[in-house]
Image (spheres, rainbow, N blue to C red):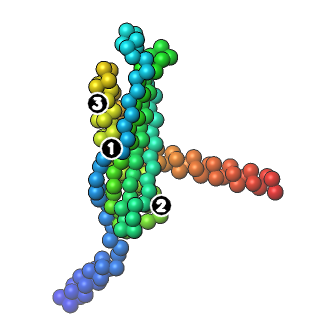
Amino acid sequence: MADEQNQATEGAAGAEAQAPEQAFTIQRVYTKDVSFESPATPQVFRKQWTPKVNVDLNTRSEKLDEEGNFEAVLTITVTASVEDETAFLIEVQQAGIFFVKGIEGEDLQRVLGTACPTILFPYARENIDALAVKGGFPPVMLAPVNFDGLYQQALVQRQAQAEGAQAGEAATH
């Protein structure tokens, strides 16, 4: 009985040793680029503050080296308009270096497209809020973003475009 337990334990340890080790760690978080524009000042401060706010998000990533370091960049652009006049435009590129090991293919793309932006978002949100306040405007409270949902939407959209392109090619042949 004890021999069977030892063999089972050794077998489990051997399986763990053969399984690829996975790792995901933050190496550094930093602000890559910041832009604040307020083209309608000071006249915009005399208007009733009922802005139309538009928020655009974009993510990108690139492999930095063969050790498994990747840079992920989350770009958020916030445009506030009052009476069809741009009150302010803020763009923040929040970036990070992430170490990823043992994660490949679609799983790697998912980590870079969801986990990294989720980590970077609070930093970008704080930068945007601070820039708006320092520019003389009310705070900008960005709502949380579901990067997993956005990633899924992008996958479905790419798949639909690919199917549409294939159908278009089939129709021309």
User: Residue tagged by mark 2?
Assistant: 106
Q: Look at the numbered discs 3 and 1 and tell me whether their residues touch, using CB distance below 8 Å.
A: no
- At label 3, which amino acid type do we have? Ala
Label 2 to label 1: alpha-carbon separation = 27 Å
- Tag 3 secondary structure: helix
Q: Residue furthest left?
A: 2
Label 3 to label 1: alpha-carbon separation = 13 Å
Q: Residue furthest right?
A: 173
- At label 2, which amino acid type do we have? Glu
Using the image, determine if residue 8 lies above or below residue 31: below
- Tag 2 secondary structure: helix
- Tag 1 secondary structure: strand
User: Residue tagged by mark 1?
Assistant: 31
Q: Earlier in the sequence, mark 2 or mark 1?
A: 1
Residue 8 appears in the picture as rendered: no
Q: Dot 1, crowdedness within 10 Å: few (<14), some or many (≥20)? A: some
Q: Residue 68: where, in percent of width, then height?
A: 37, 65
Q: Quadrant of residue 142?
A: top left
Give the numbered dot on residue 107: none
